[in-house]
Image (cartoon, rainbow, N blue to C red):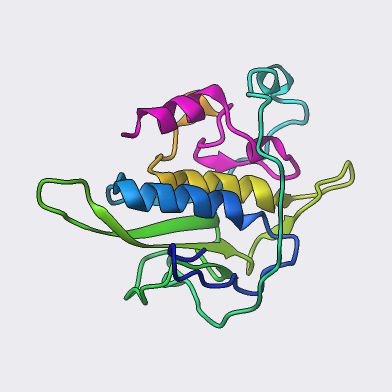
Amino acid sequence: MGRPGSCRPWRCLPHDFPPHQTVHGYFAHWEGDGIFDHLTGHWAVAPQSPPGRRPHQRAQRLPDRQPEQANFLDCTKVEADINTNSDRTDRDGLSTWDGGVLKNSVVATTCSWTWPVPGAKNDLREVDVPFNTHDVDFTNKPTSSCSNKYDIRSVGTHEAGHIFGLKDLGSEHDNLTMYQASDPCTKKCRILGKGDVLGLRSIN
Ligand SMILES: [Zn+2]
């Protein structure tokens, strides 16, 4: 993801990486409004849960969604400025999504750099989002034979929530996309739950 007006291509994630236009649009809107405060979120691997754990909860999720679009732009050698302990390092001024080594339990993480603006909300300077491609298997198409692979679009949607200013939620909110732990082999977090939407609407 790049900054508006200076768009950088994605790193060499799979070509079917989630569409960036939607995130970029929100990012531009957000940057224009300066709505983000400092945030750092980690998404940990959820404890193994029994199959069919949440069928009743899926019905609570909102059915509306944006049409999918994807255009692979190019490869880049820019990397997220986050080390193997999932901590931020010196930023390079470029917002980057990439794959690499993170803490074992972390599927992906979002780190942001903000700048105080007197009399206004903080200015977001950079957000980096690495996926733990060293320890975690990702898929774009979870199937019935899926085993311990994480839906990359679901993970991307959760991390995008951090970019917009949402924080991880505790166990009482495990039906929402911003729940702190992710489940493998499910696409349910590609869309938002009502609580996620209400959280976004509360940002002003
Ligand atoms: Zn998170």
In magenta, the rendered stretch is 175-204
Residue 5, x across and y down, in percent: 44, 67
Q: What is the quadrant of residue 4 in the picture?
A: bottom left
> Which residue occupies 63% across, 69% down?
134
> Which residue occupies 10% across, 51% down?
118
Kindly give the residue lying farthest to the right in the view shown: 145
Is residue 176 located in the magenta-colored stretch of the structure? yes
Q: What is the quadrant of residue 92 in the picture?
A: bottom left
Residue 201, x across and y down, in percent: 41, 28
Residue 169, x across and y down, in percent: 44, 34
Q: What is the quadrant of residue 3 in the picture?
A: bottom left
> Which residue occupies 15% across, 54% down?
117
> Which residue occupies 57% across, 27% down?
193
Q: Is residue 198 above or below residue 110?
A: above
Relative horizontal placement of residue 181, taking residue 4 as reference (left or right): right
Kindly give the residue lying farthest to the front in the view shown: 5
Q: Is residue 54 above or below residue 122?
A: above
Is residue 35 located in the magenta-colored stretch of the structure? no
**Quadrant the C terminus occupies:** top left
Relative horizontal placement of residue 199, taking residue 145 as reference (left or right): left
Kindly give the residue lying farthest to the left in the view shown: 118
Residue 128, x across and y down, in percent: 45, 64
